[in-house]
Image (cartoon, rainbow, N blue to C red):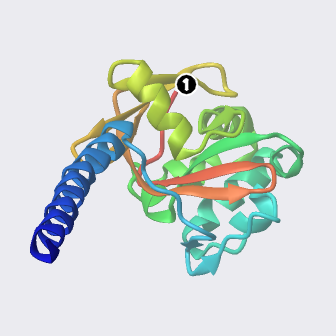
Amino acid sequence: MKTNHSMRILVASLCIALSTAAAVPMAFAQSDAMGSMGMHKDPMVGGAAMYPSKNIIQNAVNSKDHTTLVAAVKVAGLVDTLSGTGPFTVFAPTNEAFAALPAGTVDNLLKPENKSTLTKILTYHVVPGRLTSHDLAEAVQAGGGKAVLKTVEGDSITVGKDGSKWTVTDDKGNVADITIPDVIQSNGVIFVIDKVLMP
């Protein structure tokens, strides 16, 4: 009797183990289907911790990778706007992204007479609302592989996935990779990107 009882326990244990093993790949498949970029708690950006208690400008000024962007925001007079309640979702190009533009482009944009053009480019990187990677992944899935987002500037950008990379494509067809997602701010979210988007 004890042997039969032990066998039943062993068989039951094996059944549970097998059903659990089968469920694990399914869970990964569902996670992959969601296409989530993954949340990062207080990620480091440009060598500085990004605190969700601070606003977009308060955090951005501490990133060594975004000094050009911060300088441009100041010249364009957008500091108060991006320090406001928002919320905003900002796709933030790095210094390297700005440096990759044709020679002289940044210096030219920072001239007072080109403030309107600079403002147009910067607000093209801002989407109204607080969108996390989870929100973007759901929008991409609902859109059959892409999500078209209207920017504060008025034109649209397109978020999609290229293999394992999440991308943002501008109206001219330039494709930027999202290198750091979900940098949560008190007034929105920042996604670090590796190219400057052009309306």
- At x 60%, y 33%, the residue is 124
- At x 25%, y 45%, the residue is 26
Residue 186 in view here: yes
Q: Is residue 1 above or below residue 123?
A: below
Observer-nearest of 199 and 107: 199
Q: Quadrant of residue 140?
A: top left
Q: Amino acid at mark 1?
A: Leu
Residue 171 in view here: no
128 to the left or right of 125: right
Q: Quadrant of residue 179?
A: bottom left
Q: Picture coordinates of residue 13 (x, y %)?
A: 21, 65
Q: Is residue 120 above or below residue 118?
A: above
Q: Is residue 177 above or below residue 168?
A: below
195 to the left or right of 55: left
Q: Picture coordinates of residue 182 (x, y %)?
A: 57, 55
110 to the left or right of 78: left
Q: Quadrant of the N terminus?
A: bottom left
Q: Picture coordinates of residue 133 (x, y %)?
A: 51, 45
140 to the left or right of 164: right
- At x 32%, y 40%, the residue is 30
Say which residue label 1 marks.
149
Callout 1 secondary element: strand
- At x 63%, y 45%, the residue is 90
Observer-nearest of 193 and 129: 129
Q: Picture coordinates of residue 142 (x, y %)?
A: 43, 20
